[in-house]
Image (cartoon, helix red, strand yellow):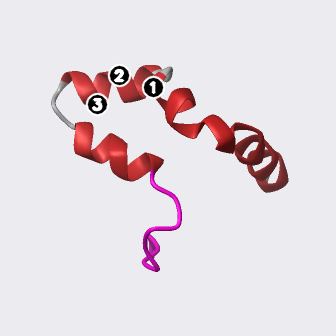
Amino acid sequence: MASAAADLFEAVRPRLTQALAECVGIRELEAVGLHSDVEVAASLDVSWVELRFDV
């Protein structure tokens, strides 16, 4: 599964912003005023911080 997700990301990477703009979830975020969250989601290689979940 992870390799399929990585392959999909590489296929979409050149048009990531456009692909996200076409996503219903992104449109919903923007509709409630979370445009800055959308910009962060579309940003690549801008931070060394990674999200970590500890269970």
For the view shown, which residue lies furthest in the left direction?
33
- Tell me: residue 45, above or below residue 30: below
Q: Which callout, 3 or 1, points to the residue nearer the camera?
A: 1
The residue carrying mark 3 is 29
Q: Nearer the viewer, residue 44 or 6?
A: 44
Rounded to the nearest whole Å, what is the CA distance between mark 2 and mark 1?
A: 7 Å
Number of numbered callouts drawn: 3
Dividing the image into 4 quarters, which one contains the C terminus?
bottom left
52 within the magenta span: yes
For residue 27, the mark is 2
Q: Residue 44 in magenta?
A: yes
Secondary structure, mark 1, is helix
Q: Which residue is mark 1?
A: 21
Question: Within 10 angstroms of label 2, few (less than 14), some, or many (20 or more) residues?
Answer: some
Q: Secondary structure at mark 3?
A: helix
Q: Tell which circle, 2 or 1, labels the residue nearer the N-terminal end.
A: 1
Instruction: Report the Cα–Cα distance between label 3 and label 1.
Output: 11 Å
Q: Earlier in the sequence, mark 3 or mark 1?
A: 1
Q: Amino acid at mark 2?
A: Arg
Amino acid type, label 1: Ala
| Tag 2 secondary structure | helix
Q: Give the main secondary structure of the magenta stretch.
A: loop
